Image (tube, rainbow, N blue to C red):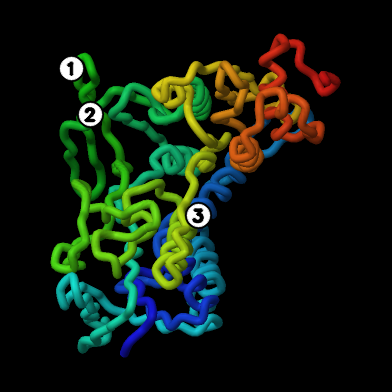
């Protein structure tokens, strides 16, 4: 059967593309070899955040920071917790993915696809999961097969298990936790981990792993060549993700890939074959479901209508769901300097933010990166409770090319964490220790 758009994969990029195509009246088919919905709803964002929320509830129950309130954290019934997570995932997969496909009217073929027919006449050969093979021909093709673990949520998982009562050690190969964030962010989250009893070893390489069904040990070699043997019941590897492209016969279809297997595209998501497009984690870009959705939607519009739409990453928000969360948007201080732009930065401790003070949790910082000459805000980075919500406002400020002065004069509701944005902007002209809600 012939379609306007054939999509390989069924995650965020795939669904955004399919919805865009159906809204334009195009016929769509989707091929998925595993569980429909992709990484985010099945094994990534949704289940991990559900478990993180549960772990946070248990942690808060054992937290005695408020006078006059005594609570305690009971043991965890892991089977019940996991079952609840699975039920949530199944419900969201049905409502946000498979149900949408039915509503919009496209078929999801359960099977494994590979390109055939050569670069000039690409066709998908689909080996169905229920047996047999189906050829799929389309005017345009989109590869949205995502990425596979390795795994990229080491900090989140470390804190999750620690809050569920597990003894945890984090071994980081680079010289600090969150090594691609600002140094002040790294220092803040390392203090958080230390305060919660999570051991951290940086500049460390795991040189060997041994064990049996009941116990395991890892030998860690530090930068100075010193070895440490650490014994644990389980070892979790969280060393990133790699694009899923094996078996697609991309070379035969005239699609170029990079050294990590990622599909190379232009800024409009087109591959080296003008009839084949790619979007989401498989392209090796920022691995966020909202990025995948943006790329998928634009790829479909470009493929079917020549729209020439691109994605602007200048104010891209990023969140690591530790507690307090790590969030950032825009450039780091080092990135701005590498562009040859003189930088002016301020760092505000959460001890200067009223919301953090009354919540009795002043762990964290807010850092604002600005151009020295113009005062234009180029980056915001935070470790704070609610940092993920705060960073949305920061992203808008960067996109609108606001200056430090603009941000310092902007409205901010009192006793919200987002007020930290206004306060750090005011720190460019005032002593941080003297900031208050009355500063104008």
- Image position, residue 431 (x, y; %): 71, 9
Placement of 57 over or under 27, stated as above or below: above
Residue 299 visible in image: yes
Comparing marks 1 and 3, which lies closer to the viewer?
3
Marks 1 and 3, the one that precedes in the sequence: 1
Tag 1 and tag 3, C-beta contact below 8 Å: no
* x and y, in percent, of residue 123 in the image: 23, 78
Could you tell which of marks 2 and 3 lies nearer the N-terminus?
2
Labelled disc at residue 13: none
Report if the CB atoms under discs 2 and 1 are less than 8 Å apart: no
Disc 1 crowd, CA 10 A, few/some/many (<14, 14-19, 20+): few
Disc 2 crowd, CA 10 A, few/some/many (<14, 14-19, 20+): some
Give the residue displayed 46% in from the left and 41% down from the top: 156
For the residue pair 200 and 339, the one nearer the viewer reads as 339
Report the disc number at residue 205: 2
Which quarter of the figure is the C terminus placed in? top right
Q: Compute the Cα span from label 1 to label 3.
A: 42 Å
Q: Residue at x 41, y 35 (%)?
A: 167
Query: What kind of element bears circle 1?
Result: loop
Q: First in sequence: mark 2 or mark 1?
A: 2
The quarter in which the N terminus is drawn is: bottom left
Query: Which residue in the protein does label 3 denote?
Result: 290
User: What mark, if any, has residue 225 been given in the picture?
Assistant: 1
- The one nearer the camera, 65 or 323, is 323
| The image quarter in which residue 139 lies | bottom left
Q: Dot 3: few (<14), some (14–19), or many (≥20) neighbours within 10 Å? A: some
Residue 134, above or below 408 = below
Residue 10 percent coordinates (x, y): 40, 69
Judged from the image, the secondary structure of the residue bearing numbered disc 2 is: strand
> Residue 208 vs residue 244: left or right?
left
């Amino acid at each position: 059967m012939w379609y306007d758009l054939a999509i390989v994969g069924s995650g965020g990029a795939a669904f955004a593309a399919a919805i865009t195509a159906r809204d334009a009246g195009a016929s769509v088919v989707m091929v998925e070899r595993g569980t429909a919905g992709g990484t985010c709803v099945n094994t990534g964002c949704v289940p991990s955040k559900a478990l993180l929320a549960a772990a946070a509830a248990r942690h808060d129950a054992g937290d005695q920071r408020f006078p006059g309130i005594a609570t305690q954290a009971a043991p965890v019934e892991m089977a019940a917790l996991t079952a609840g997570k699975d039920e949530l995932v199944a419900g969201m997969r049905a409502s946000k993915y498979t149900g949408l496909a039915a509503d919009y009217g496209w078929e999801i073929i359960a099977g494994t696809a590979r390109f055939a027919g050569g670069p000039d006449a690409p066709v998908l050969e689909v080996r169905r999961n229920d047996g047999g093979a189906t050829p799929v021909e389309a005017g345009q093709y989109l590869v949205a097969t995502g990425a596979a673990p390795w795994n990229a949520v080491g900090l989140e998982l470390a804190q999750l298990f620690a809050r569920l009562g597990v003894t945890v050690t984090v071994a980081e190969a680079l010289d600090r936790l969150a090594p691609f964030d600002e140094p002040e962010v790294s220092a803040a989250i390392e203090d958080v981990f230390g305060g919660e009893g999570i051991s951290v070893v940086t500049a460390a390489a795991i040189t060997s792993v041994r064990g049996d069904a009941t116990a395991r040990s890892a030998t860690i070699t530090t930068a100075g060549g010193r070895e440490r043997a650490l014994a644990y019941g389980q070892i979790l590897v969280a060393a990133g993700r790699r694009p899923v492209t094996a078996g697609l016969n991309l070379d035969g279809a005239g699609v170029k890939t990079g050294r990590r297997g990622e599909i190379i595209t232009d800024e409009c998501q087109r591959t080296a074959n003008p009839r084949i497009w790619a979007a989401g984690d498989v392209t090796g870009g920022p691995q966020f479901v909202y990025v995948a959705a943006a790329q998928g939607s634009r790829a479909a519009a470009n493929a079917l209508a020549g729209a020439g739409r691109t994605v602007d990453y200048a104010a891209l928000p990023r969140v690591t769901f530790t507690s307090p969360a790590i969030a950032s948007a825009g450039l780091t201080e080092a990135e701005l300097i590498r562009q040859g732009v003189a930088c002016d930065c301020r760092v505000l401790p959460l001890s200067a933010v009223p919301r953090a003070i009354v919540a009795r949790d002043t762990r964290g910082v807010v850092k604002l990166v600005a151009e020295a000459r113009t005062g234009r805000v180029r980056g915001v980075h935070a470790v704070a409770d609610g940092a993920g919500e705060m960073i949305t406002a920061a992203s808008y400020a960067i996109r609108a090319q606001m200056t430090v002065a603009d941000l310092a004069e902007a409205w901010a509701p009192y006793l919200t964490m987002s007020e930290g944005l206004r306060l750090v902007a005011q720190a460019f002209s005032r002593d941080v220790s003297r900031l208050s809600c009355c500063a104008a």
